[in-house]
């Protein structure tokens, strides 16, 4: 049954892809004829409304969550930035490049962001196809390990969930990177840059983890708020919006009212990151040695995640839901492999 459910999602993927292509094509056309400001924003609001409705087209939490992240969050924020003449989207882009940039976490090789490439953190040097193979090999092992979950304590289970989320995201993003890079010469926004080397919360969130999100929150939330209310307010606003968008994604996945724990997690980190920034603004004050800062940062991220972030997932039963769908996806892949083997044998026998 799980495999049949995942198989049925293929039709939804086709329909959603067609709808996203049509919506982004219209957005490019409208932006090309209207100047940034209220008229362009009014013309683009129907696109934003569609992006917020798209996750409901899917029956499984996996695809609802993925479409919510790519389209409802990143996509809608890119459209809002386009409305005011900022961000990665430009009407002058070719249609395929515009649609892919708007719908997926990708960036053009020759984008203006690349001008500051020398100042940006160096992303993982592991090539996307290798990451696909690595994550594709690890995830089935993680799924298999879930059958022993009753013998695990709470923290062992949370570590397993962390690994599942990390490798699932890496598999998804590396797969998209491989396809988009080969077809259109576009690059994925790097998702992570060795987060285990983070020496502060600012380093972790701003330069190492979820870099696609920070690259969108910076021009859309942080910069405008900072210009009016200062750095601390900009940091808190960015983390607040991140928390609210995570709550929205969890709502799409579980279809239940948010608990507020995820928002509290990000507000706590935003407050601490703002405090770090304030402390760093005083050159003569004491600095933690890197050998101490690194484990303290990772311990804080893990501890607060186990306290606030992951319990929100477990309370809603999302872990069990995702597990069933992953098992269905594995079964679907096994069926596809068997069908491919049969087709290969038939072709070989006729030659």
Image: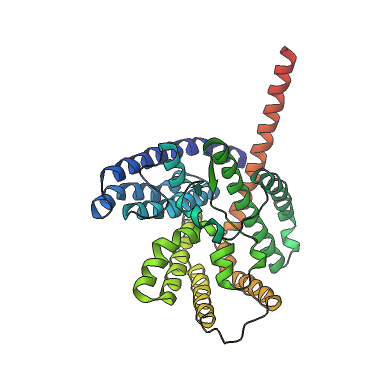
* Displayed quadrant of residue 145: bottom right
Residue 52 appears in the figure:
yes
Q: Is 218 displayed left or right of 335 in the figure?
A: left
The answer to which image quadrant residue 154 occupies is bottom right
Viewer-side residue, 170 vs 101: 101
State the residue at coordinates (64%, 70%).
302
Q: Quadrant of the C terminus?
A: top right
Residue most toward the bottom?
Answer: 285
286 to 71, vertically: above or below:
below
Q: Please tell me how many numbered marks the rendered image carries.
A: 0
Q: Position of residue 135 (x, y in %)?
A: 68, 49
Q: Nearer the viewer, residue 299 or 194?
A: 194
Residue nearer the viewer, 276 or 268: 276
Quadrant (top left, top right, bottom left, bottom right) of the N terminus: top right
Residue at image location 46% in from the left, 42% down from the top = 100
Horizontally, residue 310 falls left or right of residue 241, namely right
* Image color mode: rainbow
Query: For this rendering, which residue is in front, 256 or 19?
Result: 19
Q: Position of residue 45 (x, y in %)?
A: 30, 50
Where, by quadrant of the figure, is residue 150 drawn? bottom right
Q: Is residue 194 above or below residue 230?
A: above
Confirm whether residue 308 shows in the render.
no
Residue reaching furthest left? 39
Position above or below: 160 against 228: above
Residue 30, given in percent of the width and then of the height, sits at: 29, 43
Q: Is residue 102 left or right of residue 157?
A: left
């Amino acid at each position: 049954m799980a495999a049949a459910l995942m198989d049925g999602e293929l039709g939804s993927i086709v329909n959603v892809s067609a709808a996203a292509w049509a919506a982004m094509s219209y957005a490019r056309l409208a932006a090309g004829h209207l100047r940034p400001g209220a008229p362009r924003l009014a013309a683009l609001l129907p696109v934003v409304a569609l992006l917020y409705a798209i996750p409901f087209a899917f029956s499984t939490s996996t695809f609802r969550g993925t479409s919510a992240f790519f389209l409802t969050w990143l996509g809608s924020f890119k459209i809002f930035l386009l409305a005011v003449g900022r961000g990665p989207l430009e009407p002058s882009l070719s249609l395929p490049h515009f649609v892919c940039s708007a719908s997926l976490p990708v960036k053009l090789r020759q984008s203006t962001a690349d001008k500051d490439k020398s100042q940006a953190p160096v992303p993982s040097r592991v090539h996307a196809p290798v990451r696909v193979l690595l994550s594709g090999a690890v995830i089935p092992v993680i799924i298999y390990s879930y059958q022993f979950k009753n013998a695990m304590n709470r923290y062992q289970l949370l570590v397993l969930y962390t690994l599942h989320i990390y490798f699932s995201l890496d598999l998804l993003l590396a797969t998209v990177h491989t396809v988009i890079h080969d077809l259109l010469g576009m690059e994925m926004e790097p998702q992570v840059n060795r987060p285990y080397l983070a020496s502060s919360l600012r380093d972790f969130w701003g330069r190492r983890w979820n870099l696609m999100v920070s690259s969108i929150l910076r021009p859309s939330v942080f910069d405008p708020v900072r210009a009016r209310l200062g750095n601390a307010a900009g940091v808190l606003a960015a983390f607040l919006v991140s928390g609210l968008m995570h709550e929205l994604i969890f709502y799409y996945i579980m279809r239940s009212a948010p608990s507020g724990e995820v928002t509290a997690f990000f507000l706590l980190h935003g407050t601490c990151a703002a405090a770090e920034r304030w402390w760093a603004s005083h050159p003569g004050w004491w600095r933690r040695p890197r050998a101490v800062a690194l484990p303290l940062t990772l311990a804080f991220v893990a501890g607060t995640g186990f306290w606030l972030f992951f319990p929100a997932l477990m309370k809603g039963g999302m872990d069990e839901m995702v597990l069933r769908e992953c098992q269905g996806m594995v079964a679907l892949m096994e069926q596809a492999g068997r069908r491919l083997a049969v087709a290969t044998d038939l072709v070989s026998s006729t030659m």
